């Protein structure tokens, strides 16, 4: 923590990046830390390679997020997603510090961060994945934390920044997203203590819950219908898959299919729920959830991904059936001999 505070104190121009296929913790943490850095007078550039998905665009500051941050070697200025807008940061690609959020390996930053673009610039990794081995110059990693946003509350207060309504709103969104509204096993008394501080600072729990869990696109329900119609129970593994063709037919984006794995995991007979999503480039995003007693983290690691004991994932080469068979085989083996996971 002290090394992290020193790095931030000494930096003026900071690039903050979060992971691809961003969830609420990825975006909430990015924006919450962004506001805190700006209130310290830092020049902060916020980046997410996949942009900010529609469900999170209500969060303050989301319009400032860029997909391809400028690098010292140029190529800067225009953002392919917001077309025409220049980057908000004044750094022109010359950063003193890069902060990476909520990702357990650097490939998860996608095109938002490639180390070779920033030689000699320190990387501060802030993350709560148990599978994070610490690939930064300084690593702040707490697998006990329910969300990266939870960790940021402590960091921000140690930086001497008072929580305001904007910071608190973004961070409570992150906390809610990763605990599914304080319902998952990673919710500890400390988590609720942090949530209380965020509410006291002006975050509206009811409004955030409504935005994050009760506001959906029509396309996302269409995809859910297709995914549920095609799901299969294979011993104790409940899985379904969503191809690009299905997304097209539903008029949906990949983000519209992001919560489906949580629906599958509510089935009593399923010990593991898996959703396979085909990406536009043909690779397959694998999202997994497990009942307590099945530790997904080492399984995801063996598949080249990462995550938490009860929620993990990986990205595999296509085609869909090949990726599916590889994952199901790995899961069957792990369920047959759970002792290996101890
Ligand atoms: P989700 O199913 O919500 O996409 O992901 C569940 C958890 O696994 C999240 O904590 C997420 O960060 C992690 N995860 C998902 N996909 C990958 C991946 O490709 N690589 C790594 N390292 N972690 C992943
Ligand atoms: Mn997270």
Image (spheres, rainbow, N blue to C red):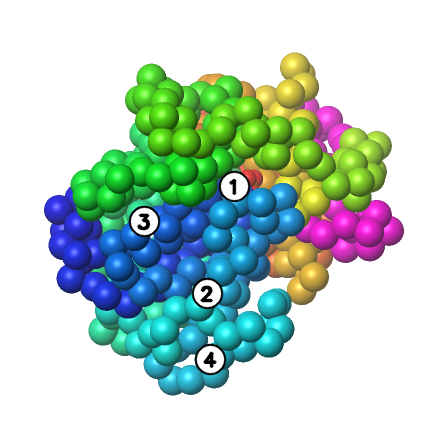
Q: Name the residue beneath numbered marker 3.
A: 36
- Give the extent of the magenta segment: 230-254
**Residues tagged 4 and 3 counted as in contact (Cβ below 8 A):** no
Q: Earlier in the sequence, mark 1 or mark 2?
A: 1
Question: Circle 2 is placed at which residue position?
Answer: 112
Kindly identify which numbered label has been placed on residue 24.
Answer: 1
Nearest to N terminus: mark 3 or mark 2? 3
Residue drawn at (32%, 49%) of the image: 36
Disc number placed over residue 76 in the picture, else none: 4
Question: Residue 142 colored magenta?
Answer: no
Q: Position of residue 279 (x, y in %)?
A: 67, 57
**In this view, the mark in front (3 or 2):** 3
Q: Are marks 4 and 1 in contact (CB under 8 Å)?
A: no
| First in residue order: circle 4 vs circle 1 | 1
Camera-nearest residue between 278 and 321: 278
Q: Residue at x 64, y 20 (%)?
A: 266
Q: Quadrant of residue 212?
A: top right
Picture layout, residue 268 above or below residue 15: above
Cα separation between marks 1 and 2: 18 Å
Element marked by disc 3: helix
Q: Secondary structure at mark 4?
A: loop
């Amino acid at each position: 923590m002290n090394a992290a505070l020193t790095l931030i104190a000494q930096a003026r121009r900071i690039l903050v990046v979060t992971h691809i296929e961003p969830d609420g913790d990825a975006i909430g943490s990015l924006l919450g830390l962004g506001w805190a850095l700006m209130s310290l007078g830092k020049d902060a550039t916020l980046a997410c390679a996949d942009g900010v998905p529609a469900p999170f665009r209500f969060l303050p500051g989301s319009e400032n997020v860029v997909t391809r941050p400028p690098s010292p070697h140029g190529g800067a200025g225009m953002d392919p997603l917001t077309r025409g807008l220049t980057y908000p940061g004044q750094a022109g690609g010359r950063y003193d510090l890069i902060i990476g959020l909520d990702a357990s390996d650097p490939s998860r930053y996608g095109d938002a961060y490639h180390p070779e673009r920033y030689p000699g610039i320190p990387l501060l990794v802030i993350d709560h994945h148990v599978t994070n081995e610490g690939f930064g110059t300084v690593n702040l990693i707490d697998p006990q934390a329910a969300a990266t946003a939870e960790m940021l509350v402590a960091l921000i207060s140690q930086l001497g920044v008072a929580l305001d309504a904007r910071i608190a709103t973004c961070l409570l969104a992150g906390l809610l997203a990763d605990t599914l509204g304080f319902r998952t096993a990673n919710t500890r008394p400390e988590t609720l203590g942090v949530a209380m501080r965020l509410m006291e600072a002006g975050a509206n729990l009811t409004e955030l819950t409504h935005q994050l869990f009760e506001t959906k696109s029509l396309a996302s329900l269409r995809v859910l219908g297709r995914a549920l119609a095609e799901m299969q129970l294979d011993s104790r593994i409940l899985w379904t898959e969503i191809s690009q063709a299905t997304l097209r037919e539903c008029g949906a984006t990949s983000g519209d299919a992001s919560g489906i794995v949580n629906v599958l995991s509510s089935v009593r007979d399923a010990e593991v729920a898996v959703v396979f999503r085909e990406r536009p480039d043909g690779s397959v995003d694998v999202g997994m959830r497990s009942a307590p007693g099945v530790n997904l983290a080492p399984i995801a690691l063996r598949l080249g991904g990462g995550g938490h004991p009860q929620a993990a994932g990986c990205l595999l080469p296509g085609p869909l059936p090949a990726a599916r068979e590889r994952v199901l085989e790995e899961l069957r083996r792990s369920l047959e001999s759970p002792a290996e996971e101890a």
